[in-house]
Amino acid sequence: MRKIKQLLENFNTLYIEEYKTTWVKTKLSTADDLLMVAKALKEHGLRTIATVSPTDFLEENVIEMNYFFEDLMTNRNCWLKCDVPRELDECEIESLTPLFKGANWHEREAYSMFGVRFLNHPDLRPIIVSQDFYDKTPFRKDFDWDAHDKNTVKNMQKIVDSFKAEEAEADKGIDAESSETVLNWGPTHPASGPIRLKVHCDGEDVIGIDPDIGFVWRALEHLVTKKDFVGAIVAVERLCFMDNVNSMTAYAQAVEEIANVEITEFAKWMRVLLGEVSRISSHAMGMGGFYNALGLHTVAMWNMDVREFFLDFLESYSGARIATAAVEPGGVRYGLQQNMLDELQLALDKFDATKDSVKDIFINNPTMKMRASKQGFISNLDVQDYSLCGVVARASGVKIDVRIDEPYAAYAEIKMDYVTQKDGSAKDRLINLFEELEQSVDIIKQAKRHIEEKIASGEFDPTKDQMVKVPKKLPRGEAISRVEWSRGEVLMHLVTEEKGTSPYRLKMKAPSFNHTMMLDKLLAGQTLSDIPLVFGSLYICQGDLDR
Amino acid sequence: MILELLKKVYRVSKALSVKSPATEDVRTHVMHQSDRFRGEHQIDYETCIGCDACNKICPTTAITMKHLPFKKQNIVPEVNLGVCIFCGLCEDVCPTKPEKSIILSGGRYDMLSGGWHEDQVNFWVHVDVPQEYIDSRLEAEEAARVKKELEAKKKAALLAMKDKEVKAPVSGVPDFSGEQI
């Protein structure tokens, strides 16, 4: 940490300060230095860039760029800021993609949403947004959504026209002599979900893949700014339904940090409990997704059966099985009753009763091992370059887990260790998924025991302790909050205004975005039949891919 | 032979007494019932104080306020269930005690079962305020207004009386302030 600070002191900065335990926060006086600083940071070991997050300040007439550099090996991070002018003609900054491959799509996103042009970016096309938003800046504060919505028919026509033009263009480029062609994998492929992979292939050999994403773009980051701090949870939880509790936890932590509110111990433990239940419900579906892509639906059915018991607990606790809206700034929304814990015990018993047969049949499955152990290799270095996280990173042997690296909620008091594999093939990712399921069950058991003990001793009052009051208006400030989501690290960057009643800007860095970026690298040179396998193993959810 | 036949008859007749699970109407049974299940809203127009808090917090603007012909507490929420996402925030913010005026928890789980698509065209929780209630509220308001007016008149009369009592001796005393100069 001290070394990073020393290194930053060589440049013109407005301030350098420590933030939380693992971050150094700084702001460059001029954006021209960015490339040099980034180079120096990379040489120093911060090889990963988590995300690029512009914030539009209308009054100051600047766009503030936020770069989050991470060193996955030693857990040192740097939060770098710099200003770029707001006028569309001058709104440009040096691209970091040549240095950090993982910045690629994040810069494209900033370009499509804020109109920030990145110089020397190898492939600066709009991403996520549909064609009617091209050359517009939907996330800027002065963008007129109502005016855009008035022209719905014209907008639809634009999308259709550009799709037709693209089809015509694709036909033109094909060499009549060769067998090269462009194949659309998805969005109606049984294993794809709402994503379209434009597969350039020669026969059945894949030449390259260009993912077309944005089919379920809901502009969540914009929607959040239209709601108050409490109402925003319903937009945040829609990051992905499979694990919605942990994303709300990330948001709630950021709000609490700005409001300077300390939540109760009980709420912290409840966040662990609910988060792990949610993680199990997601991982169970993830395992099913992997095998579904291979064409075997049994494990999905079996896992769904177990998952229902965990959802029963969520329903008893919050009143909804999927969209729980259970975590709010200030704690958790509801109190706890003993019959809910009994229901959770039923779910844990069900998991323990079935896990051996799932392991025997599907995890130690010789056919799956033959098929998947030679596909989709991700090396240790790839993880750092492309900023991969979660199951995908740990299956490649990288020891990262926010629950251990930067403990939040009550994770500091929980006994757990990194679950990792060695090779980083598709098979390893499946095995890692299953082992994390077992780990989650173990964490739930610890948390449940702790909560029951504290309730018995009278330290927790489960009917009153769940919430502390968070003011409706927050002071001007900003915070970042990281949680280990089921799919990997979620980083939320929250900016508030003085006496603001709703978030001014919320950037959600979601893991699937980076994982989808890997598809081209993983599948080039493979065959068409490998696409579902590798895609399924990356544990991608379109909800957090598009946001 | 006869014994076996009787056995068979007995076995089959046993099945008659057991109700087959396939004949159960699953629309009226629920696999897992939660007390907090967030279903269709129940709105109590009598306790609602018309504070508009549920309307303000609703993340999807599913709530519209229906106007009632009163002077005070003259709005009551109505919910468009086609837009509602059942997050339950309206219930959280409702300030009435001890019972909340808008409740989802423990609501119906079979909202969408049964009926036809026509039933869903107007898929709302409407508040039907009976005419008697409106009349009684209007009467009460009128009575309160009359009472207030009467009180105000009384007060004014009292004040006037007091003024007279206070002023009377003052007017009786000769004023020499002008002559002193």
Image: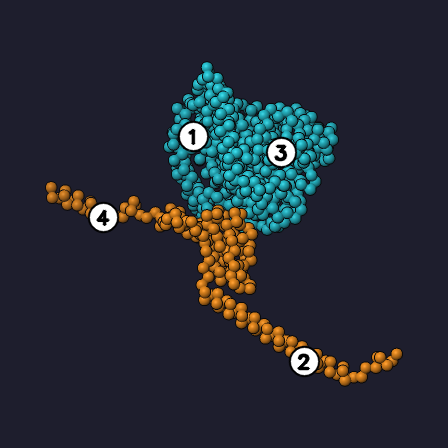
Element class at badge 1: loop
Residue denoted by label 1: A189
**Chain containing the residue with disc 3:** A
| First along the sequence among labels 4 and 2 | 4
**Chain containing the residue with disc 4:** B
The chain drawn in orange is B
Which amino acid does the dot numbered 2 rest on?
Met
Q: Are marks 1 and 4 in contact (CB under 8 Å)?
A: no
**Disc 4 and disc 2: Cα gap in Å?**
91 Å
Element class at badge 4: helix
Frontmost of labels 2 and 3 is: 3
The chain drawn in cyan is A
**Chain containing the residue with disc 1:** A
**Chain containing the residue with disc 2:** B
**Disc 1 and disc 2: Cα gap in Å?**
91 Å
- Who is closer to the viewer here, A468 or B31? B31
Element class at badge 3: loop
**Disc 2 and disc 3: Cα gap in Å?**
76 Å
Residue denoted by label 4: B16
* Tag 3 and tag 1 share a subunit: yes
Residue at figure coordinates x 54%, y 27% from the top left:
A517
Element class at badge 2: helix
Which amino acid does the dot numbered 1 rest on?
His
Rendered image coloring scheme: by chain
Frontmost of labels 4 and 2 is: 2
| First along the sequence among labels 3 and 1 | 3
Residue A195 seen in the figure? yes
Q: Are marks 3 and 1 in contact (CB under 8 Å)?
A: no
Residue denoted by label 2: B161
Which amino acid does the dot numbered 4 rest on?
Leu
Percent from the top left, x then y, of residue A164? 49, 29
Residue denoted by label 3: A115
